[in-house]
Image (tube, rainbow, N blue to C red):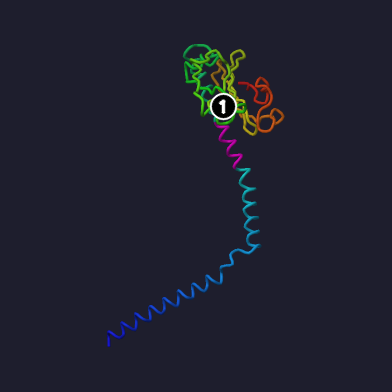
Amino acid sequence: MQNLKIIFSIKLDRFDRNLTARLFRKYLNNNQEGFTLIELIVVVVIIGILSALSIPNFIKFINKATEIEGSTQVSNFIKAAQMCYLDYGKLPQNAGELSKCTPVPACQWAAHLKGKEICKTWKQLDLAVDNPSTPQWNSPLGFFNIRMSQKGTNLFIRSIPYFKGTAGTSACFNSITGTITTGTFKTRDSYYSGEKRSVGINTNDDVPELNC
C-alpha cells in the first residue's frame, strides 16, 4: 500500500510539472508579438530625454576635469616660486630658475593646434634642460598656456585655457608680505572660434594678473 502511494505521488508530481510547462509555453506563444509601436515610441522618447539631461552635465564634467590641470600647475608653481625666493633671495623669472625648486614639465605642442591627444604621443619636455629661459610654456597635457610675469615685488603665474568652457587660473606672490593670492576666471567667448582659442596667446586679459 505504501509503495502504491509513492508511485501515485510521483505520477501526480510529473503530471503537475507537465501541466505547468504546457501552460508556460502557451503563455509565451500568446505573447510573442513583442513591443507595440506605441511602446517603442515611449522608449525612444525616454532615451532622448535622458540623453538631453546627461550630455550637458557630461560636458561640464569634462571641462572641470580639464580645468584641474591648469589650476594644479599654477598652485604648484606659485608655491615653488615662494620657496625659491626664500632659498635664493630673488623671484624666479623663467622656467629654468623656477625648476630649481620644482620640476617644470611641458608639452611640445598646444593641444588646440595639434589635437587633444598630441601630448600623449610626444616626449614631454623638461624645461630645466630643454628651454630654461622661457617665461611661458604649454601645460603637460597641452590644454593651457602657463606664463610667468613680474611687476616690482610681485610675481604672477597664470594658466590660459586653449579650449572654450574651461576657466583660467591666476596667482600672485608678494615677496614683501609673503602672501599668495589665487583666483579663477571665466574666459571670454569672443576669444574662441568654436571650442578653440583663436586670438594670439599674448591677448590674455581674460585671465588677468591679480593684485596681492
Q: Position of residue 126 (x, y in %)?
A: 49, 19
Farthest residue to the bottom: give it: 1
Residue at image position (53%, 16%) is 95
Left or right placement of residue 3 versus residue 127 in this view:
left
Instruction: Give whichever of 12, 172 is nearer the camera.
Output: 12
Name the residue beneath numbered marker 1.
142
State the SS at label 1: loop
Going by the picture, which residue comes out furthest to the top? Answer: 89
Task: State the image quarter where residue 195 is shown.
Answer: top right
Residue pictured at 54% horizontal, 30% vertical: 69
* Image quadrant in which the C terminus is located: top right
Relative to 190, does residue 28 appear above or below in the rendering? below
2 in magenta? no
Q: Which residue is drawn at 47% across and 18% down?
A: 101
124 relative to 39 in the view: left or right: left
Residue 91 lies, in percent from the top left, at 54, 14
Q: How crowded is mark 1: few (under 14 residues within 10 Å), some or many (20 or more)?
A: many
Which span of residues is magenta-colored? 58-68
Q: Is residue 119 above or below residue 93?
A: below
| In the displayed structure image, the side of residue 166 where residue 97 appears, left or right | left
Q: Magenta region, mostly helix, strand or loop?
A: helix
